[in-house]
Image: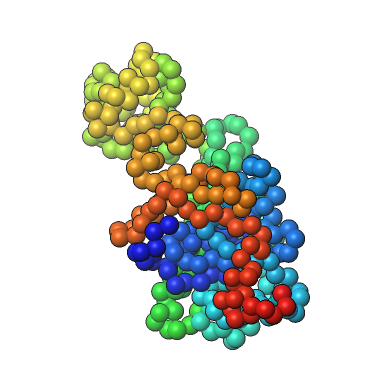
Amino acid sequence: MDTTMARPLDGVTVIDLTRVLAGPYATMVLADLGARVIKVEAPGSGDDARAFPPFVAGESAYFASINRGKESIALDLRDAGDRAVFEALLARADVLAENFRPGALARLGYGWESLHARFPRLILASTSGFGQTGPEAARPAYDVIVQAMGGIMSVTGHPGQPPVRVGTSLGDIVAGLFTVVGIAAALLRRGVTGLGMHVDVAMFDCQLAILENAIARLQVTGEDPGPLGSRHPSITPFQALATADGPIVVAAGNDALFERLAEALGLAGLAADPRFATNAARTANQPALQALLEARLATAPAAHWLALLGAAGVPAGPVNRISEALAMAQVAARTMLVETALPGGQSLRVAGNPVKLSGVPDPPTRPGAPALDRDRARILAWLGLAGKPA
């Protein structure tokens, strides 16, 4: 990896107690931005995700995909010798990231008050299901729990169908991203005050934070929003539409774009029809409009319509499978599929870093995920503990 140009978080050291997804996703982003991330794992087993499929030659691709570029040391925080190593790490660190259930870290003797008194510059980032406070704080949570309890599942899928989980682990990933925002803010503030902060991010809170339009509609109408398939609740047409050989998505986000859409489809009269002349009217008459559009789209394949709509400047696109999305030239142009390695050295392609920064390299290869305890000797040497009993 090109290290001739500084990345934004070069010089920042993160001690990573997180496991599975929300926390490791956050620390992966920090590592991509230049932080040194030292993953502290349980001896023998390590991060639970090391046992999650899919596997390549016995190694978890799931684990490798979100733990690239990190170091690993195995420590038992109930063992006096390992606690001494851990505390030496804290003394050198800028951030301690953890996603234990609230209270677990304090029971080990590393609650916020204790940490802040001993290591005043240290930032503690806690990512949990329901946060460090409130009546649900002790409740265990996984992605599907917060998607359900936070309301996302109630507006996902098609009307009249059973509840549907969003097809990626949105509960974990959004919490990881908000954790990164909190850590970045705390690092910036520490530059002013010299003191660390406790960053408290709840997966449940993050699901509420991204409900945007749904919360606004509830407050205005007093009615709970429900699932609408691919439709937008207040912009029409803004959805998947069937063509002769498969669906496309169309997003005519204003009246001018709808006029272009109608003209491109040879249905110019639709824009003058009172039922469809404004976005509010189109939304009120969405079923009738969808029927008219799909009747026209059924006369030719998706590629034909996408070419016409593209030429007319109407936002539209295919409904890609994952393999089709990754095969797009845009992915290569933006370095959004990068080469890394599993702990055993096997090659693995994973998603790249979507944060592109001027003057910062964005190479097509990234350091691999660590084998459990791989970096013990190097970390102990850095701490000045080389040669002491491990």
Residue 119 is situated, as x and y percent measured from the top left of the image, at: 56, 83
| Figure quadrant of residue 97 | bottom right
The one nearer the camera, 285 or 190, is 190
Q: Residue sitting at 66 percent across and 52 percent down?
A: 49
Q: Residue sitting at 61 percent across and 65 percent down?
A: 375
The one nearer the camera, 128 or 272, is 128
Residue 307 is situated, as x and y percent measured from the top left of the image, at: 29, 24
Q: Looking at the image, is 252 positioned above or below residue 303?
A: below
Name of the residue lying farthest toward the bottom: 117
Q: Looking at the image, is 304 positioned above or below residue 171?
A: above
Tell me the colour scheme of the image. rainbow
Residue 66 is situated, as x and y percent measured from the top left of the image, at: 55, 53
Q: Residue sitting at 63 percent across and 34 percent down?
A: 162
Tell me if residue 383 can be seen. Answer: yes
The one nearer the camera, 101 or 341, is 341
Tally the numbered discs. 0
Q: Looking at the image, is 17 positioned above or below residue 239?
A: below
The one nearer the camera, 100 or 331, is 331
Tell me if residue 284 can be seen. Answer: no
| Figure quadrant of residue 113 | bottom right
In which quadrant of the rendered image does the N terminus lie?
bottom left
Residue 314 is situated, as x and y percent measured from the top left of the image, at: 28, 32
In which quadrant of the rendered image does the C terminus lie?
bottom right
Q: Could you tell whether 271 is left or right of 229 in the image?
A: left
Name of the residue lying farthest toward the top: 299
Q: Could you tell whether 66 is left or right of 7 in the image?
A: right
Q: Looking at the image, is 375 positioned above or below residue 321?
A: below
Q: Could you tell whether 83 is left or right of 209 in the image?
A: right
